[in-house]
Image (cartoon, rainbow, N blue to C red):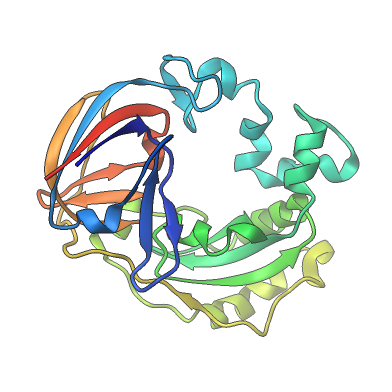
Amino acid sequence: MQYEGVLRKMQTEIASPIQYYMVFKDDFLNVNQVLNKTLKINFIKHQCLNCGNDRPIYRQGFCKSCFFEIPSAGDWIMRPELSTAHLGKEDRDLEYEKKVQLQPHIVYLANSSNIKVGVTRKTQVPTRWIDQGAHEAIEIVEVPNRYLAGITEVALKDHIGDKTNWRKMLTNAIEDENLVEWRSKLKQYIPMEAQEYFLDNNGETHLEFPVLQYPKTVKSLNLSKTPEFEGVLKGIKGQYLIFEDDTVFNVRGSEGYYVALGIH
């Protein structure tokens, strides 16, 4: 089987285990069906997810000029506390920013390598947790806009981490935690503006990933340095493909790379 197209983050579907899909312009691949098969990846060119031009990818699948111009790459994406649409203030495109920022957001705890706090739009639960490779997660607050979620995350970061150790996540060196207890402990640190949105009646969500073999040590595949790679696929976790030789490939980190995929 042969596939060709620009890489975007894999789409997912809740199941036991989670189902993963690579979606291209005219085709899609259920990646779960490639487990225990040989996957060959050939890097052909760059293709910016915004302008479509063959320019080096700067960040998030965009070339440098698009990254600094388009509204979907504003600083408030990575730092939600910088959101200003609730004040009617524009960053790059107020209509776009209102659409994204002025909707329900969740502040959550996720356990992928360690417990971390994070923010996502309500519509992205549990997709966001899957993308981070979290085997368990729980909501803390549900607020009406991105700004309130951002300041809550900032306040909680003083008491719990906000980063995932991706190597630890991929080797499955994890421990189960009681996230309900953690949520109760952290409640006192939620800003006053968000206290009324605290959630206390929902339980943990548990996620199962399609992994047959975890790597003992992690070797990361970079298509810019290694434009051709071939290996037996042994698992999918977060947005990573895991191969038999302990190589891992971050699909989301390679957005904007146009590739050919061969499966045999």
Q: Residue at x 48, y 23 (%)?
A: 48
Q: Residue at x 55, y 19 (%)?
A: 51
Q: Is residue 205 left or right of residue 31?
A: right
Q: In front: 173, or 160? A: 173
The image quadrant where one finds the N terminus is top left
Q: Is residue 193 visible?
A: yes
Q: Is residue 166 left or right of residue 215?
A: right
Q: Residue at x 15, y 34 (%)?
A: 229
Q: Pinpoint residue 97: horizontal percent, then vertical percent.
A: 76, 38
Q: In front: 192, or 84? A: 84
Q: Residue furthest right?
A: 88
The image quadrant where one finds the C terminus is top left
Q: Residue at x 44, y 62 (%)?
A: 13
Q: Quadrant of residue 142?
A: bottom right
Q: Quadrant of residue 219?
A: top left
Q: Is residue 198 left or right of residue 170?
A: right
Q: In front: 137, or 235? A: 235
Q: Pinpoint residue 55: horizontal percent, then vertical percent.
A: 43, 14
Residue 262 lies, with reference to residue 11, above or below; the image says above
Q: Is residue 161 visible?
A: no
Q: Pinpoint residue 19: horizontal percent, then vertical percent.
A: 36, 62
Q: Quadrant of residue 225?
A: top left
Q: Pinpoint residue 144: horizontal percent, then vertical percent.
A: 80, 59
